[in-house]
């Protein structure tokens, strides 16, 4: 009986809950699409250089395997040394490329999340949401407000 007034009070007051799909924001929001294109153009030259270098290594490897038996010992060793140095250089550049790309992706993602969080807060205040959650295991589609957030982001809010 003592809990009856509390449960009645909670039942009479509806709680408005919304859900935002963060992955959709990263995939569909105009700011995310723009950031992805920016990163692609920023890193495309280095990626192409790495691909050229990989082809050069493969070509050198094939040449060495094909001609190893007919080469003079010193020439074979020199080519093996060149191949090893080129492979090390490639691995170093590839590692640096991945690190730089990850760093830039994290920077861009942080900016997107910051804008999205502002849009979520504005939506929550303007439409009187009590709770908006992200990254849940399951949610009813009727609670999904992701489209509203993507629209707000595309309008530059």
Image (tube, rainbow, N blue to C red):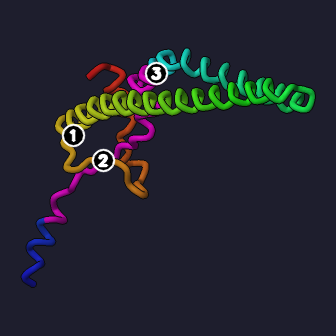
| Viewer-side residue, 38 vs 122 | 38
On the image, the x and y values in percent for residue 17 come to 27, 51
Query: Callout 1: few (<14), some (14-19), or many (20+) C-alpha neighbours within 10 Å?
Result: some
Q: Earlier in the sequence, mark 1 or mark 3?
A: 3
Identify the disc placed on residue 124.
1
- The residue depicted at 49 percent of the width and 27 percent of the height is 97
Stretch of the chain drawn in magenta: 10-36
Spatial distance from mark 1 to mark 3, Cα to Cα? 31 Å
Split into 4 quadrants, where in the image is the C terminus? Answer: top left
Residue at x 87% of width, y 31% of height: 68
SS of the residue under disc 2: strand
Q: Give the residue at mark 3.
A: 39
Q: Residues within 10 Å of mark 2 (few under 14, many from 20)?
A: many
Q: CA distance from mark 2 to mark 3?
A: 31 Å
To which quarter of the image does residue 61 belong?
A: top right
Does the CB distance between marks 2 and 1 fall below 8 Å?
yes
Q: Please tell me the numbered disc located at residue 74.
A: none
The answer to whether residue 56 is left or right of residue 14 is right
Q: Position of residue 20 (x, y in %)?
A: 35, 43
Q: Which residue is the site of mark 2?
A: 18
């Amino acid at each position: 009986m003592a809990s009856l007034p509390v449960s009645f009070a909670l039942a009479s007051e509806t709680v408005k809950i919304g859900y935002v799909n963060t992955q959709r924001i990263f995939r569909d929001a105009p700011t995310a699409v723009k950031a992805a294109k920016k990163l692609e153009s920023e890193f495309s030259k280095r990626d192409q250089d790495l691909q050229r270098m990989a082809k050069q290594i493969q070509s050198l490897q094939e040449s060495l395997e094909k001609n190893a038996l007919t080469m003079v010992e010193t020439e074979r060793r020199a080519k093996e040394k060149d191949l090893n140095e080129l492979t090390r250089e490639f691995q170093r550049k590839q590692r640096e490329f991945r690190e730089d790309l990850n760093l830039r992706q994290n920077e861009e993602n942080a900016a997107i999340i910051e804008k999205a969080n502002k849009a979520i807060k504005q939506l929550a205040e303007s439409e009187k949401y009590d709770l908006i959650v992200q990254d849940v295991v399951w949610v009813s589609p009727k609670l999904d407000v992701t489209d509203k957030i993507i629209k707000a982001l595309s309008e530059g809010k």
